[in-house]
Image: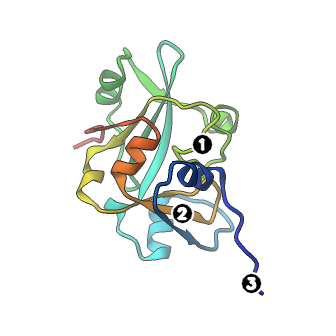
């Protein structure tokens, strides 16, 4: 009998909220970046999203979910969340702030529900791809369902 894949916290949250999703498991010995993972899985960059965690001038944390091949526009991001400025948190702080590791960070099920902004281009897809909460696991779901479950918003936050 095949071993049943353990659910991640992100999947449990989706289940609890009765949100439909699919899981994609893949081999991942070492995380490099989201584009490499998309290439490995034959996925479009614009449909594959990375989760970025920032800290504002006030000390508050903010989550931005953007396509893997794009860069965040920090000025736009700060304005959207009402901060003077935001910057990426140091990689060494990812686990302490989110409960996740680099490459396995997802907007679902962080230690706290931080204000979350999803790049508005996501609404052009029936399904987007995000991390499943650990290396080698992806969740595919409707972007509007993601917005709902993280109490987020859809905004333009990438560099044009």
Q: CB under 8 Å between callouts 1 and 2? A: no
Residue 95 appears left or right of 32: right
Q: CB under 8 Å between callouts 1 and 3? A: no
Give the SS element for disc 3.
loop
**Which mark sits nearer the N-terminus, 1 or 3?**
3
Residue, far bottom: 1
Quadrant position of the C terminus in the picture: top left
Residue at the spot x=37%, y=14% of the render?
84
> In the rendered picture of this protein, how many numbered marks are placed on residues?
3
Residue at the spot x=48%, y=41% of the render?
52
Give the SS element for disc 1.
loop
Q: Which residue is mark 1?
A: 109
Quadrant position of residue 116: top left
Mark number, residue 69: none
Q: Which residue is mark 3?
A: 2
Quadrant position of residue 59: top right
Image location of residue 98, percent across then percent down:
63, 37
Mark number, residue 138: 2
**Which mark sits nearer the N-terminus, 3 or 2?**
3
Q: Which of the two residues, 132 or 44, is positioned nearer the viewer here?
A: 132
Image location of residue 123, percent across then percent down:
26, 52
Give the SS element for disc 2.
strand
Residue at the spot x=62%, y=53% of the render?
12
C-alpha separation, residue under disc 1 versus residue under disc 3: 27 Å
Residue at the spot x=42%, y=48% of the render?
146
Quadrant position of the N terminus in the picture: bottom right
C-alpha separation, residue under disc 1 versus residue under disc 2: 14 Å
Foreground label between 1 and 2:
1
| Residue 56 position (above or below residue 93) | above
Image location of residue 29, percent across then percent down:
69, 68
Image location of residue 14, percent across then percent down:
53, 52
Foreground label between 3 and 2:
3
């Amino acid at each position: 009998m095949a071993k049943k894949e353990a659910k991640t916290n992100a999947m449990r949250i989706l289940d609890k909220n009765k949100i439909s999703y699919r899981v994609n498991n893949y081999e991942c010995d070492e995380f490099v970046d989201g584009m490499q993972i998309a290439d490995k899985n034959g996925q479009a960059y614009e449909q594959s999203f990375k989760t970025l965690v920032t800290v504002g001038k006030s000390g508050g944390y903010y989550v931005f979910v953007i396509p893997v091949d794009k860069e965040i526009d920090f000025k736009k991001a700060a304005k959207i969340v009402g901060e003077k400025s935001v910057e990426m948190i140091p990689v060494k702080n990812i686990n302490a702030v989110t409960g996740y590791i680099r490459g396995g960070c997802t907007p679902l099920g962080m230690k706290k529900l931080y204000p979350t902004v999803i790049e508005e281009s996501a609404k052009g897809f029936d399904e987007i791809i995000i991390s499943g909460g650990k290396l080698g696991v992806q969740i595919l779901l409707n972007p509007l369902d993601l917005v709902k479950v993280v109490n987020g918003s859809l905004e333009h936050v990438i560099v044009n």
